[in-house]
Amino acid sequence: MVEKVASLNMEPLDTSDTDRWVGRPIGGGQLKEPITRNDIRRWAQGMQNPNPLYYDERYAAESALGEILAPQSFTVNCTVGLGTVPAIQGNIPGTHMLFGGDEWWFYGPRIRPGDRIRSERMLFDYRVSNTRFAGPTMFSRGDTTYINQRGETIAKGRCIAIRYRAENARAMGSFTDQKMPEWKIEDLEQLEAQKFAYYETFRNHMIRYFNDVNEGQHLPVRPIGPHTVQTFATEWRSYIFTVWGAEEPDGLPNSSMEAGWLPELLRDMEKAKVDPSYADGLYHGPASHERNAQTIGMPRGYGYGSTMGSWVLDYLTNWGGELAFVVHCNARYVGPAFVGDATFLTGRVTAKEKSPRGNAGIVSIDVEMKNQDGMLMTKAQAEVRLPLR
């Protein structure tokens, strides 16, 4: 494939405009309203995570948490732009972007209904490398820090944006062998049975203790899918900022809307003053039609990388039980979740370390995400805090 990159006439990336954004505060939208229970319920539904801790107030009241709290994955729902806004700065004409990964550091405060969350953003750094997907490709990292109304820092998320020239990706044709899978009825029935079996692993109140976890232990398989336009649309609509009027600009500089997007993938901000659907990211713009996927070098529709990262976080906390807390998770995305594919998450405990304070321990877990053909989509390493028995 290296020979193929060298033999094609690749369009270059001019990253000079990005340099001026590195290390400076970046603006964007902020959520107007406090978090509500229904925001949390809608998130659990959109992420296909039927854990009653996040939608059933009676079940949550009987839990160790005592009330409905947001899952840790919900944190990315408390900003505007999926956490990628600080990673998409500087004008590079003719480019599009994909999610390359998310790294999370969680500091302790949980998100509750009634909380008001604001975001602080910064472009951390970037590099340019040749890839088999699109030749010259920028990997930019942007930080979003989430702060509640008490001034407590909830978490920091570092998102990787993969920015590339769309014509290069089309010329490379890296995904030309990706065909829509055909599912037999018996295969779909088996998949549904697998999903139901996974849901039953966290259906009853459960606290997983550090003492009971062994190095080399495997987590249960979590199946998701097959993915459809409907499931991807439901995921998108679970993000608060996609609701008309839910956000307002904070007044700080931000160039993500002038990043050099392809004309056919732009949101029409003037028309959105009359009809907000022109800017809500679903009916118009990059997510509006499957042919847009082919325009940017993809074979068919696919889901957002931030949702893939949320699947990983939900997978870890569902396994850990009501008192588990992910302190760190670093996920790298190798390939997207395509329409028609199913996704399977697996995990394995790789290490254990008792906390110096003596009331908890840290469990290290490796997570992989693959499709039905065994193609790798995500690799993640995480540290989860569990209570001592």
Image: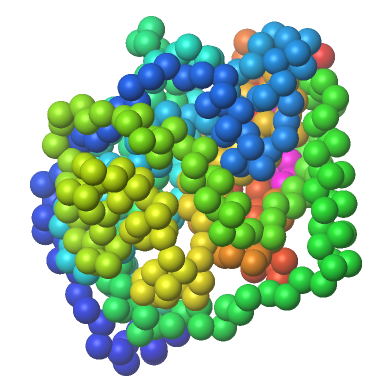
Nearest the camera: 44 or 207? 44
**Horizontal and vertical percent for residue 63?**
76, 13
Tell whether 23 sits left or right of 57. left
Residue 321 in view of the camera: yes
**Horizontal and vertical percent for residue 300?**
51, 71
Q: Quadrant of residue 14?
A: bottom left
Residue at horizontal 51 percent and vertical 19 percent from the top: 36
Number of marks: 0
What colour scheme governs how the chains and residues are painted in the rendered image of this protein? rainbow
Tell whether 100 sits left or right of 278. right
Q: Quadrant of residue 245?
A: top left
Rendered view: 124 above or below 289: above
**Horizontal and vertical percent for residue 196?**
84, 44
Nearest the camera: 49 or 202? 49
Rendered view: 337 above or below 21: below
Residue at horizontal 74 percent and vertical 26 percent from the top: 52
The answer to if 87 sits in the magenta stretch is no
Secondary structure character of the magenta stretch overall: strand
Residue 158 in view of the camera: no
Q: Quadrant of residue 11?
A: bottom left
Q: The N terminus is located in which quarter?
A: bottom left
**Horizontal and vertical percent for residue 371?**
67, 64
Q: Residue furthest bottom?
A: 7
Residue at horizontal 81 percent and vertical 14 percent from the top: 389
User: What residue range appears in magenta?
Assistant: 347-353
Q: Residue furthest front?
A: 274
Tell whether 277 sits left or right of 202. left
Residue at horizontal 53 percent and vertical 15 percent from the top: 112
